[in-house]
Image (cartoon, grey):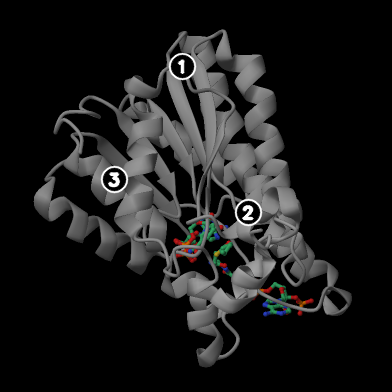
């Protein structure tokens, strides 16, 4: 789909890049010539992922243990990364989430999700941004949000609040920093099965299929579909796309929104009976 050197020369940091969608995006960035840095809290996970990724891209993968909720740790990671040269792109992918009845959430539970998604994304974005602005460097930020960043969603309220904030950050900084060469965009995925998300968000095995197929295409997303979209948005070919959120959900959220979409339930006979009688 892309020229094999689409991302050659770009150095990309993917937060939470050791697992799931972050790992899938990192793999594809490497295939298209980028250098990659990944971070997360679990050293063993990052080390294993980096070893795996390095097999096909030797010398182009770095990893850093970093809890992005900790602003000082983020600053230390960025200092270390910049010692080897500047980054060209950031993917805000790290997230925390679980389903719960909101009235049962403790303050620590709310803080856990807001800390990772809202504060963490802000720390990494501003940390990179101030360096790029000081250097006069062109760069790009891509944040992985969700469609409930604008619809809201029951049972994942801290996540919805935080993702809405990340989307607001994306649109705000696209204007504030766009004129100085920094583009910010977001991707809103529908269901893309990953271990991290499914073990926290799918409460019963029998609900997994429903979650994965409640969209017009009746299937979940494939990791490579999301990874290709991320490559395009980070590439120079997307140089005029700034402040945008691209939904990749098979039409899931629109299906839930359209007032008459439930009429897919009507039978052939129902539709025939609705036609005006001729003559
Ligand atoms: C209620 C919960 C809870 C749950 C944790 N808590 N899980 N409360 N229901 N299921 C509460 C704890 O009791 C504690 O509060 C507080 O949250 C912090 O919990 P810890 O386990 O100490 O936190 P921590 O180790 O920092 O872990 C953070 C986490 C965890 C967010 C809770 O799930 C995590 O590490 N997640 C990272 C990966 C992840 O979430 N991936 C999925 C992303 S998917 P108290 O008061 O008891 O101390 C995604 C998809 C969106 O975002 C859209 C899908 C379509
Ligand atoms: P995942 O595999 O659980 O990925 C989350 C990653 O974030 C993990 O690698 C985790 O590593 C890292 N992380 C969590 N807290 C962190 C912290 N404090 N500091 C640094 N890293 C941290 O889940 P996923 O499904 O791939 O999700 C990836 C992104 O896609 C998330 O932004 C999610 O909201 C979004 N998304 C996913 C779906 C889906 O269907 N899968 C749908 C919509 C949006 P550690 O635990 O080692 O820190």
What is the C-alpha distance between the residues marked 2 and 3?
A: 39 Å
Which quadrant, please, contains the N terminus?
top left
Q: Which residue: 75% across, 70% down?
A: 109
Is residue 140 placed above or below 95 in the rendered structure? above
Horizontally, is 10 left or right of 52 in the view?
A: right
Q: Residues within 10 Å of mark 1 (few under 14, many from 20)?
A: few
Is residue 205 placed above or below 152 in the rendered structure? below
Q: Earlier in the sequence, mark 2 or mark 1?
A: 1
What is the C-alpha distance between the residues marked 2 and 1?
A: 26 Å
Q: Earlier in the sequence, mark 2 or mark 3?
A: 3
* Helix, strand or loop at mark 3: strand
Circles 2 and 3 in contact, beta carbons < 8 Å: no
Q: Which residue: 27% across, 41% down?
A: 29
What residue would you read off at disc 1? 240
* Helix, strand or loop at mark 2: helix
Horizontally, is 109 left or right of 36 in the view?
A: right
């Amino acid at each position: 789909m892309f020229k094999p050197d689409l991302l050659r020369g770009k150095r990309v940091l993917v937060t939470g890049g050791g697992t799931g969608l972050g790992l899938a995006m990192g793999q594809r960035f490497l295939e298209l010539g980028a250098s990659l840095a990944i971070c997360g809290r679990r050293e063993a996970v990052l080390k294993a992922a980096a070893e795996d990724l390095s097999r096909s891209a030797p010398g182009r993968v770095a990893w850093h243990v970093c809890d992005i909720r900790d602003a000082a740790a983020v600053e230390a990671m960025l200092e270390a990364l910049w010692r080897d040269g500047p980054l060209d792109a950031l993917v805000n992918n790290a997230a925390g989430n679980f389903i719960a009845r909101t009235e049962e959430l403790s303050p620590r539970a709310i803080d856990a999700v807001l800390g990772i998604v809202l504060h963490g994304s802000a720390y990494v974005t501003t940390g990179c941004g101030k360096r790029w602005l000081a250097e006069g460097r062109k760069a790009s930020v891509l944040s992985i949000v969700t469609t409930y960043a604008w619809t809201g969603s029951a049972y994942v309220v801290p996540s919805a609040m935080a993702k809405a904030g990340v989307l607001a950050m994306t649109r705000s900084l696209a204007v504030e920093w766009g004129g100085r060469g920094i583009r910010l965009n977001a991707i809103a995925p529908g269901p893309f099965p990953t271990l991290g998300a499914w073990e926290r968000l799918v409460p019963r095995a029998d609900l997994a299929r429903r979650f994965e197929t409640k969209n017009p295409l009746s299937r979940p997303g494939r990791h490579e579909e999301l990874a290709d979209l991320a490559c395009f948005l980070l590439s120079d070919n997307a140089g005029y796309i700034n402040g945008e959120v691209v939904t990749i959900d098979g039409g899931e959220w629109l299906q839930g929104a359209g007032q008459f979409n439930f009429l897919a339930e009507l039978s052939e006979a129902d539709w025939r009976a609705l036609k005006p009688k001729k003559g």
